[in-house]
Amino acid sequence: MIPYIYLLVCWLALPLQALEILDPEEVEYIRCHATATAGGSVTLDCGSTVPAIFIWGFTKPGTDSNVAVAYNYGQGPKVQAQSSSLGRMRVPANTSALVIEELQRDAEGMYTCQALYDTDEGTRITFYFTRLEVEDD
């Protein structure tokens, strides 16, 4: 079975054909850590500037499966229905941040935001990795 995130990236490849990535070696990786309480809320950042395109993925501890939970490929943010088991997710207007409310214990894991920024020098890609720990209330 082909992972869902792979299909999503392949599907998004068509709009990306116009983006020229000048040096794919210059991908930036940013790692951080967040802790939140079950039943509460948490905001996971995906940079200080809204990217042209972004995809939020989630990986549960002990697995290699990365599941898309939210994305915006230029037509407004969308949240995937299967993400509801983690809590109530949303992407606030004019941001790329992922907000999880009514946080479930199962939301603990690694969240990855793949962000593509269209700049005068070409497309810049940044991966934001956030390890989320969920504590009991």
Image: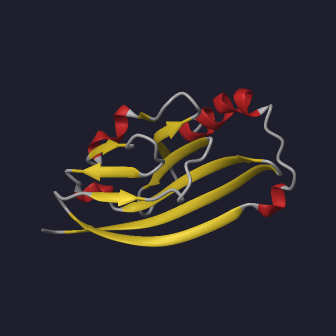
User: 85 or 118, which lies in front?
Assistant: 118
Q: At 54% across and 53% down in the image, what residue appears?
A: 113
Question: Residue 49 in the image: x percent, y percent?
Answer: 56, 54
Q: At 29% across and 40% down in the image, what residue appears?
A: 84
Q: At 86% across and 56% down in the image, what residue appears?
A: 23
Asked if 78 appears above or below 23 in the picture, the reply is above
Asked if 80 appears above or below 133 in the picture, the reply is above
Q: Quadrant of residue 93?
A: top left
Apparent side of residue 14 relative to residue 91 in the rendered image (left or right):
right
Apparent side of residue 111 relative to residue 84 in the rendered image (left or right):
right
Instruction: State the residue lying farthest toward the front.
Output: 120
Instruction: State the residue lying farthest toward the right.
Output: 22
Question: Residue 8 in the image: x percent, y percent?
Answer: 59, 34
Classify the position of the C terminus by image quarter: bottom left
Q: Quadrant of residue 79?
A: top left
Let me know if residue 130 appears in the view: yes
Asked if 79 appears above or below 135 in the picture, the reply is above
Q: At 68% across and 48% down in the image, what residue appears?
A: 117
